[in-house]
Image (cartoon, rainbow, N blue to C red):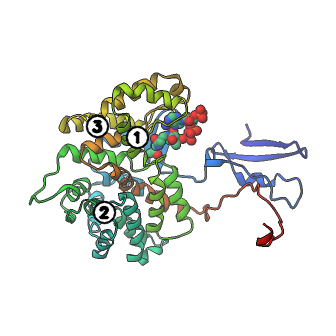
Amino acid sequence: MPETLTIIDNRTGTKYEIAIENDTIRAMDLRQIKIRGDDLGMLSYDPALMNTAAVKSRITYIDGDKGILEYRGYPIEQLAENSTSYLEVAYLLITGELPNQKQLEEWCSDIQKHTFIHENIKKLTEGFRYDAHPMGTFISTIAALTTFYPEAKDIFSAEMREKQIHRLIGKATTIAAFTYCHSLGRPFVYPANDLSYTANFLNMMFKIGESRYTVHPVFEHALTVLFILHADHEQNCSTNVMRSIGSSHVDPYSAVAGAAAALWGPLHGGANEAVIHMLDEIGSVARVPSIIGDVKDGKRKLMGFGHRVYKNYDPRAKVIKKLADQVFAVTGKNRKLDIALELERIALEDDYFIKRKLYPNVDFYSGLIYEAMGFKINFFPVLFAIPRIAGWLAHWQEHILDQEQKITRPRQVYLGHRGRTWVTIKKR
Ligand code: ACO
């Protein structure tokens, strides 16, 4: 069976033979399809890049129909179950292999060396309004790191890349916690590097007054699992932004800030915050049927439902649901859980949702856990961005080292005016 695709252009009757590799054709091969010799040639039109593979990647595998998610070949359920630290999974994503004991210790130590931030960054945080959305502060502060580490622009030095990776992962939690403390007028808590990545973060967030703050082991575990689940998700909106910005060869701080901005939107990482607002607005289980009715009438969306790739179930949502029980056993049940469960129950039995293959995604239950743990609702997107930094950096590095890649520059189908003649302002 030849690995080719035959295309006949019925405008000209010309036949083209196009190579198939990995079940794809190269869009550039369509360019030979022309009516006249000076034509640009055929383009493929793909709004929202629904059917365009723009990269070859070895980082994360998703089979949306079967509900499979793997990082570097390891199923997400196994990583969530067995990995004892987020940094171990970050290492896997970035280097491609699970670390041995020595590698893990070195990796953790390298990152912990970079958890402190320059005092001027602290002052920068203080410059934001106390009621600023934490994601706005987080994005801006990450972007500002580029002004402290100008050597980061040396992106083709492996040593320099590694250093910025350590810095970005190390400082992300400190910047996030300082953002949080600033919004509440609390004193900043400096990193405690004898704690795990997530315990140190919880310590910086919630320690106030006590000489020795004890991080609850259930919360530390829950946050570790949530960070693992959010660490990467192949070519999603923000990762595509990370790769696209990185393709211009800018430094990784600028690229991560751009990716985090893409993550913030309510259709992406901002959905966890939107879900809680939605549950608050619904207010009671009794109102669920009327909300479902509004969704079916096209008046609103069910936040935390639906996914571009998962059309069966989101495997992360399954892990999170189990985790929720462990956290609620400590905190008491989040009163919004009953509303969420009823929404899920009715939606999963309803034809509208069944036909469109709409299932709860990772964000449907994560916010309920975060809220029970004491995080403020508008902080949820930051809790998504912190772990996703490892994924963004893995993709950034893969992208800039890929010899087939160039600066990202899609084409357009131009439908506007052409060749108009200037009209003076009085005559318009
Ligand atoms: N509630 C109600 N209807 C929905 C929802 C929803 N949450 N999501 C999709 N639909 C409907 C659409 O209206 C459409 O119906 P139609 O065929 O009658 O027009 C159909 O399902 C297909 O939806 P699309 O918009 O084509 O799906 P797409 O793949 O473009 O969007 C997305 C995916 C953005 C996640 C969407 O499902 C959504 O907006 N969900 C709510 C926001 C959300 O939870 N985002 C988090 C995603 S996970 C993440 O980023 C971490």
| Label 1 CA crowd tier, 10 Å (few <14, some 14–19, many 20+) | many
Residue 87 position, x and y percent, is: 31, 55
Left/right placement of residue 121 relative to residue 353 reads left
Quadrant placement of the N terminus: top right
Three-letter amino acid code at the position of disc 1:
Val
**Residue neighbourhood size for the residue with mark 3, other residues' Cα within 10 Å, grouped as few (<14), some (14–19), many (≥20):** many
Q: Earlier in the sequence, mark 3 or mark 1?
A: 3
- Mark 2 is on which residue type? Tyr
Question: Which class describes the residues within 10 Å of circle 2: few (<14), some (14-19), or many (20+)?
Answer: some
Q: Which numbered circle lies on residue 362?
A: 1
Res. 63 visible in picture: no
Q: Which residue is mark 2?
A: 130
Query: On residue 146, which mark appears?
Result: none
Identified at 46% across, 28% down, the residue is: 292
Q: Residue 173 in the image: x percent, y percent?
A: 30, 60
Is ligand 1 within 8 Å of the beta carbon of the residue shown at mark 2? no
- The residue under label 3 is 323
